[in-house]
Image: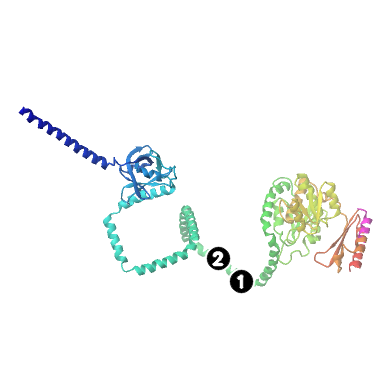
Amino acid sequence: MSARRREAPRWVDVLLGLTYGLVVVALVGGAVLAYNRAFVPRSDVELRTDSVGNALQKGSDVKLHGVPVGEVAKISTAPDGAVLTLALKPDVLKRLSPDTTARLLPKTLFGERYVDLQSTSASAGDHLEAGATIHQDASSDAIELQKVLDELLPLLKSIQPEKLQATLNELATMLRGRGGELGDTLQAWGEYVQRLQPSVPLLTEDLGRLATVADTYADAAPDLLTALDDLTTTSSTLVDKGSALTEVYQRVIASADESRGWVASNANTIEILSGESRKALEAAAPYARTFPCLLRSARQFIPRMDKALGKGTSKPGLKVVLDCANGAAYHVGPAAFRRLGAEVVAIHDEPDGLNINEACGSTHLDDLQAAVVRHGADAGFAFDGDADRCLAVDASGQVVDGDQILAVLALARLERGLLHADTVVATVMSNLGFVQAMEAAGITVLQTAVGDRYVLEAMRAGGFTLGGEQSGHVIMADHATTGDGVLTALHLAARMSETGRTLADLAGVMRRLPQVLVNVPDVDKSRVDADPVLQGELVAANGGLEGRGRILLRPSGTEPLVRVMVEAPTLEEATSVAEHLAGVVRRTLG
């Protein structure tokens, strides 16, 4: 009995020991669970991030507007980054909208990261639910901020604290007692920046242009280096040829001395020539912009003229006499015809600046007529001083005027399909025979006021390619925008060579009616169309011609006179009608 009593306390002791042990284990387990917040209510939310999410640690803070609202409970690696389980306080979910995102920010520049929730205010009944999945903020601002922080952290880590402290101490020592001076400097700098601000756009533009210039110089650098190398070679050559260059310089100096003496001896002549030339240049200035077009067209015309005039073949070229009027065509005219294989006799081709149009050229055809017959030429062409007109003479010395030239060129263009709308533009002074010949060939004649400017205006308005005046102004719009005497002569000569016909034969396409022109001066030209007596006589005279001729009364545009032009089958009839009407004009308008 006593033995049982002694054994009973031993089992009690064991039981008590086990109980105490379980209590200790329970207390330790409870402490661990309490440390791990197992007894704290929470709501889990899944956060998907890029690779930076792997840098967080379990237990890292989760904040909303800077206030901790939970922690990172679990971190799992994913193919595209990381998956974080966020343990949030249950009441926090009611303040988060369903589109909540998160940013992963460092607590300090050198500290660990935490999760910063980005959310708009959640509406009643519409908030983030437990178990939902949110994503890392992918907005441009968030990405830019993340990039800045990622790049800044390695830089800051590389800074040695002791050296940074020493630098800051030195800076503090340097600035001590200089507050006022520093303030004044900053104020002056602020004023300078304020004045500079309006010029910032221009400065930006200049810097951009500077970059462009720099790129250009960079591209040109190899060429510049090559040029410098070439310059070195050139310099060496100059040194080697020093004696020869000295001799050349001596000759240049001698020539300059001779030129100085010649200029001194001819100073008066040079001054006179300069004064006269100024007028000619001023007259030519309005047409300067047409020169490139004219020269280009002439260049394109050369191959066809070569073929037409037989250059390079056994076919002989034309023999022509050119009256250059001691003017603009004195060199170009003969050179163009010789270039194309023609035999050229040039007269009045020695201009001295004063003898232009002096008893020569298209206004004085006597010398040309005589020269054509004397030299047995195929044709002769006369230009005026500025070479914008051309009249011709056939092999027998007969004059071929602007109307006849225009008729020949119109028919040539009609054959080649180059006469736009089968129309030629002329003036009211064109001979009636020209109009009749063109109508017989099926060509329409559009007549304008007298003057090549009016002809050109009508050509441009209708897109016509050929026009001209009786005086010899001929405009070929597909070659030039004004009259060109040399070009006209070349086309006329080409027509002769192409057809094998003489100029007289070609010009015979029209019968030129006798034309009489009487100028009646010192009359009231403004009443030409209004005076009833004059108009009655005009009607009667036209009735007498019975459609066989034409009468034109035209007030002068620059003088107080009236021009009476009459065309009739015979010179006698034209003269009689013209003198009669001139007398009526004197009596009624004088």
Magenta segment's dominant SS is helix
- Position of 100 compared to 111: left or right? right
| Quadrant including the C terminus | bottom right
Magenta residues (range): 537-547
- Position of 195 compared to 251: left or right? left
Question: As displayed, is residue 124 above or below residue 406?
Answer: above
- Position of 428 compared to 94: left or right? right
Q: Residues within 10 Å of mark 2 (few under 14, many from 20)?
A: few
- Position of 407 compared to 250: left or right? right
| Quadrant including the N terminus | top left
Q: Which residue is mark 1?
A: 261
Task: Tell me the quarter of the picture where residue 36 sits.
Answer: top left
Question: As displayed, is residue 78 above or below residue 432?
Answer: above
Q: Is residue 100 visible?
A: yes
Mark 1 element type: helix
**First in sequence: mark 2 vs mark 1:** 2
Q: Is residue 101 visible?
A: no
Q: Check if mark 2's residue and mark 1's residue have beta carbons within 8 Å.
A: no
- Give the residue type at disc 1: Gly
- What is the residue that sits farthest to the front in this orientation? 1
Q: Position of residue 447 (x, y in %)?
A: 81, 54
What is the basis of the colouring in this image? rainbow
Q: Position of residue 67 (x, y in %)?
A: 35, 49
Q: Residues within 10 Å of mark 1 (few under 14, many from 20)?
A: few
Depth order, front residue of 165/280: 165
Residue occupying the point 21% across, 39% down: 27
- Give the residue type at disc 2: Arg
Question: As displayed, is residue 341 above or below residue 235?
Answer: above
Q: Assess whether residue 397 is covered by the magenta stretch.
A: no
Mark 2 element type: helix
User: Which numbered dot is residue 251?
Assistant: 2
